[in-house]
Amino acid sequence: MNHATDDAPEFNPSLSLFTPEGEFLPVSSGGNTILGPAQAYLLSLNSPRSRKTMESFLRIVSGMLGASDMESCCWGALRRHHIMAITELLREAGRATTTINTYLSALKGVAREAWMLKLMHVEDLQHIIAIRNLRGSRLPRGRALPKGEIIRLFQVCETDRSCKGLRDAAILGIILGCGLRRSEAVSLNFADIESHERALIVLGKGNKQRMAYIPAGAWQRLQRWIEQIRGESPGPLFTRIRRFDDVTQERLTDQAVYHILSVRQHEAGIGKCSPHDLRRTFATAMLDNGEDLITVKDAMGHASVATTQQYDRRGEQRLRQARDRLDFGD
């Protein structure tokens, strides 16, 4: 996916970044670097997390279009048929509909910036904007962890007498108990703890804050990490720990959380799971407890109930029960 294929749309990355009148575009991001449509689009996004996601997508697309990198890609030459070909390639590669639509949103945003920089005619922009989002859905991936696996997961953390044991129990407990995204968990600072509410102030997608209320077990694990290891100094809530229990002030990364869970699930002897499966387990438990979709939506930081509904697997259970009740006399 990072390289153009034989089916990739024709695209000329060597087209000159000049206006039709031949005037050089005096747009700079500092120094001698020209600010192109892709960079301008990324700067228009409010959330650093959104910028990171969209930048990753645009770098993939620039490779598909034959450019060496996002910065040198001639986005002003982008046309409707290029984007249609890109979405078809993504569909053939098995990308989810929602993912393809995110690519489409990014490309429309870049096209708008190209037009504003006078690198694209308005008619070409209108043709791109008119491309409709793909419709359809896929069965959700991942799984919700059963209670027995959750118990074993925390047991291996809590029997680890090193500093990592307390940290890992705390961060996995917060992700599971509050339904956080791993990026949200590693972005937490000590100042985000609301002790009187037993809650956290979480910065989620779209640069939106929400209160995440912490269950008793997760709160106890968090307190043990703070009281016995981290302390109450300002800075990242969850930090990197080097060899020989050298606790640093360096913030954990998204990838570090994935690694922590991978190690602990292997030690616990449970099925493979991802940090998002902990979030999915949270949603499943909330729904199974009878919480309404609006409550679960707010707890998970979703912008739409439709997103939350993708986590609701109760319909599948009802279908299994209906199947088991069928009796055709055979």
Image (cartoon, rainbow, N blue to C red):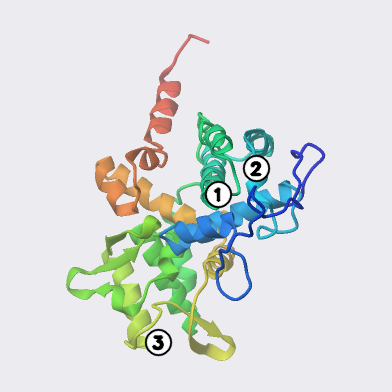
| Numbered disc in front, either 3 or 1 | 1
Q: Secondary structure at mark 3?
A: helix
User: Within 10 Å of the Cα at label 1, are there few (<14), some (14-19), or many (20+) other Cα atoms?
Assistant: many
How many badges with numbers are in the image? 3
Picture layout, residue 46 above or below residue 128: below
Answer with mark 2 or mark 3, whichever residue precedes in sequence. 2
Is 233 positioned to the left or the right of 111 in the image? left
* Residue annotated with mark 3: 229
Is 269 positioned to the left or the right of 68 in the image? left
Q: Tell me the amino acid under the disc marked 2.
A: Leu
Question: Which residue is outermost to the top?
Answer: 329
Residue 154 in which image quadrant: bottom left
Q: Tell me the amino acid under the disc marked 1.
A: Val
Residue, x 38% and y 72% (percent of image)? 188
Residue nearest the observer in this picture, 233 or 125: 125
Picture layout, residue 247 above or below residue 219: below
Confirm or deny contact between disc 2 and disc 3 (CB under 8 A): no
* Residue annotated with mark 2: 78
User: Within 10 Å of the Cα at label 2, are there few (<14), some (14-19), or many (20+) other Cα atoms?
Assistant: many
Residue, x 52% and y 71% (percent of image)? 253
Answer with mark 3 or mark 1, whichever residue precedes in sequence. 1
| Numbered disc in front, either 2 or 3 | 2
Residue nearest the observer in this picture, 239 or 302: 302
* Residue annotated with mark 1: 110
Q: Secondary structure at mark 1?
A: helix
Residue 14 in percent (x, y) is at 77, 53
Is 163 positioned to the left or the right of 193 in the image? right
Residue nearest the observer in this picture, 312 or 34: 34
Residue 316 in which image quadrant: top left
Residue 204 in percent (x, y) is at 37, 59
Q: Secondary structure at mark 2?
A: loop
